[in-house]
Each structure stands twice: as C-alpha cells, then as structure tokens.
Amino acid sequence: MWYVIQTLGGEEEHTADMIRRRVPSYYIEECFIPKRERMKKFYGQWNKVEEILFPAYIFVATDRPGELYQELRRVPRLTKVLGREEGYFVALSEEEESLVRNLGGHMHRAGLSKVVVGEGKKIRVIEGPLKDYAGDVVKVNLHKREVVVRVGFMGRETELRLGIEMVREDKRALKA
C-alpha cells in the first residue's frame, strides 16, 4: 500500500533521502516523490525540466504501516503523516494510487503529453499521461506549455499541473 507524508515545500528530496537513510529497508518497499516534466524557456530556447508533481509530499510504499509510522516519528522535518488513524496512518485509496501510477508510471514521472491546439485554446490529447484526464482539464496555459487538471486526491479536489508539447496534426493520418 502507498502512504503520503507531508513535509516542508522545497525539502522533499532532502527529507526523502533522510527517510531512506534512517528507516530500515524492511519497513519500506519504496520511498519516492512523483515528478512531472514540462517545457521551460531559458534564453530563448525551450528546455525540458523536471518538477515535483505534488509539492510538499513524499510517498512511501509499505506493508508494515504501524512499524513504519513509529520509525518515521524519529525523522526530523516531517510535518505530518497524512490520514492518521488508530495509531498509524491510512493508505491511499485504490483510485488515488491508480491516479499517481497512471500519471507517472513505474518511474513516478509524468512525461509531456502531446496535444493539438484548436480554436479557442481547445486541446486534443494525442498521447501521454494527460490522455486519461483530458476531461478534467480546468485551465490551459500555452505560454507555459502546461495544463491544470482537477482530480480527487486525499479526500479533496486537487489541481495538478502537467506539461504539454504542442504538435501539428498530421492530415494524412486523419485520412487513413
């Protein structure tokens, strides 16, 4: 099962490294920070960059949540373990875990989605992690090459920013 730990924004990598070093590996199957790719312009050139998908959160996979919770209490910089109940914390729901898996795959990295832009900034997703969430898009920012999707996560509505790559539609492919 996957669990979520809240930490200070900007401290995710450092805190995840601290968890990996201080918590015995038999309590943790995986400790990760989901990322997203996006395009960013530096000095007139578009460059692919990687950013944190869920700022201030660290994800941990374990089948021993009670013991892990006790171990995490000794790790500094954790603000709180989310969903705490009955002495330890609650796993993500299957839908929430599926969301993170669908977006980032086994590497936990949401790549760029290829989109065709139509009139009125309407986008049509050709491929990528956005494909399953095109209906959840609430904002399109072509200048920043990103879209905002609204999804249910941790019992509330959450807005996620996903990177896009604009491509031209191949007219020949449509006729085939």
Image (cartoon, helix red, strand yellow):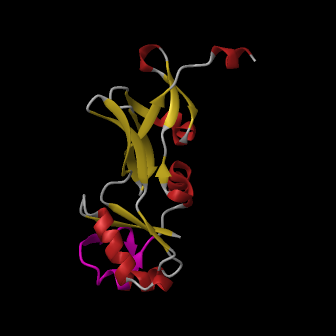
What residue lies at 48% left-to-right and 36% top-to-bottom? 136
- The residue depicted at 54 percent of the width and 55 percent of the height is 101
Q: Position of residue 73 (x, y in %)?
A: 30, 82
- On screen, residue 173 versus residue 163, left or right, reads right
Regarding residue 87, the answer to whether it shows in the image is: no
Task: Look at 46% across and 79% down and name the residue there.
Answer: 65
Q: Is residue 50 magenta?
A: no
Q: Residue at x 40, y 32 (%)?
A: 138
Q: Where is residue 76 drawn, in percent x and y?
A: 24, 77
Dividing the picture into quadrants, the one containing residue 72 is bottom left
Residues shaded magenta: 71-90
In front here: 114 or 160? Answer: 114
Q: Position of residue 13 (x, y in %)?
A: 32, 64
Name above or below for residue 12 compared with residue 100. below
Q: Quadrant of residue 32?
A: bottom left
Quadrant of the image containing the C terminus: top right
